[in-house]
């Protein structure tokens, strides 16, 4: 356990392992928890493990990661899985978002495949969805966050990762936003704040 200090009051806090090797996700989630919770401290694993995300939903993938990380490190874990769900493509790429253009596809390749599929479509609305899964060896908790936007056909912006350059919200892509702007509206923030509240309640 760790200790925190708010307004002169000493508080115990729970150390929780963050089950991801993605540096961008690590920074985003750590920043969100730091701002919104004094009782939970996210930590990075001291060694890298690979979890095969072979389930049919992001919920199942998040759970699989949490269980495997807990089995390896025997610590409370928060895992996440995210997907981009495009309405006119029946929810694709969805659970396959990170490998939409192939098993080892780059962000640029994934983006280009999505653009190609939507070239002749007037309906390009989409939803980013994140599921967080907490597991401490006894209970499993889930929270979900969503962000609605639209896919554009010409990438814009140099920030962010994944589909951020082609996901537009109120005239700006996520890749055009500062980290602070993106964090204010992000699906991960929504899911994380819900998780903080859920952990405080439990």
Image: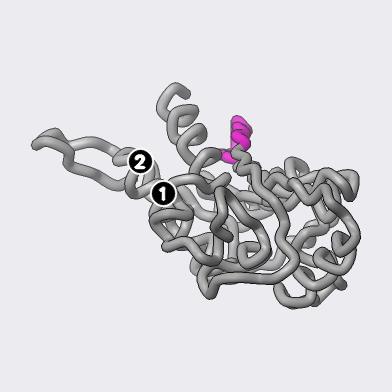
Q: Which label number is shown at residue 149? A: none
Bin the neighbour count of mark 1 within 10 Å (Cα to Cα): few under 14, some 14-19, many 20 and up. Answer: some
Which residue is drawn at the image coordinates 49% and 28% (left, top)? 198
> Dot 2 corresponds to which residue?
36
Residues shaded magenta: 133-144
Please name the predominant secondary structure of the magenta segment in the image. Answer: strand
Packing grade of label 2 (10 A; few <14, some 14-19, many >=20) is: some
Answer whether residue 139 is magenta in the image: yes
Residue at mark 1 to residue at mark 2: CA–CA distance: 6 Å
| Residue that label 1 marks | 32
Snapshot quadrant of residue 161: bottom right
Q: Residue at x 82, y 58 (%)?
A: 96
Query: Outermost residue, left direction?
Result: 8
Residue 125: x and y in percent read 75, 46
Residue 26: give x, y in percent of width and height: 50, 61
Q: From the viewer's perspective, tell me whether residue 113 is left or right of residue 4.
A: right
User: Quick check: marks 1 and 2 in contact, CB under 8 Å?
Assistant: yes
- 130 lies left or right of 184: right
């Amino acid at each position: 356990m760790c200790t925190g200090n708010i307004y002169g009051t000493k508080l115990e806090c729970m150390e929780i392992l963050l089950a991801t090797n993605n540096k961008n996700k690590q920074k985003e989630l750590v920043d969100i928890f730091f701002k919104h919770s004094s009782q939970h401290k996210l930590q990075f694993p001291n060694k890298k493990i690979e979890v095969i995300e072979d389930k049919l939903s992001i919920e199942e993938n998040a759970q699989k990661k949490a269980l495997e990380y807990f089995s390896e490190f025997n610590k409370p874990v928060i895992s996440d899985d995210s997907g981009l769900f495009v309405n006119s493509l029946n929810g694709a790429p969805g659970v396959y978002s990170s490998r939409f253009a192939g098993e080892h596809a780059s962000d640029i390749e994934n983006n280009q495949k999505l653009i190609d599929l939507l070239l002749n479509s007037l309906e390009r609305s989409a939803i980013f969805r994140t599921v967080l899964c907490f597991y401490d060896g006894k209970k499993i908790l889930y929270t979900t966050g969503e962000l609605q936007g639209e896919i554009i056909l010409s990438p814009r912006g140099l920030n962010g990762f994944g589909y951020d350059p082609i996901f537009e919200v109120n005239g700006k892509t996520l890749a055009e936003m500062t980290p602070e702007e993106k964090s204010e509206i992000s699906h991960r923030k929504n899911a994380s704040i819900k998780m903080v509240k859920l952990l405080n309640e439990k």
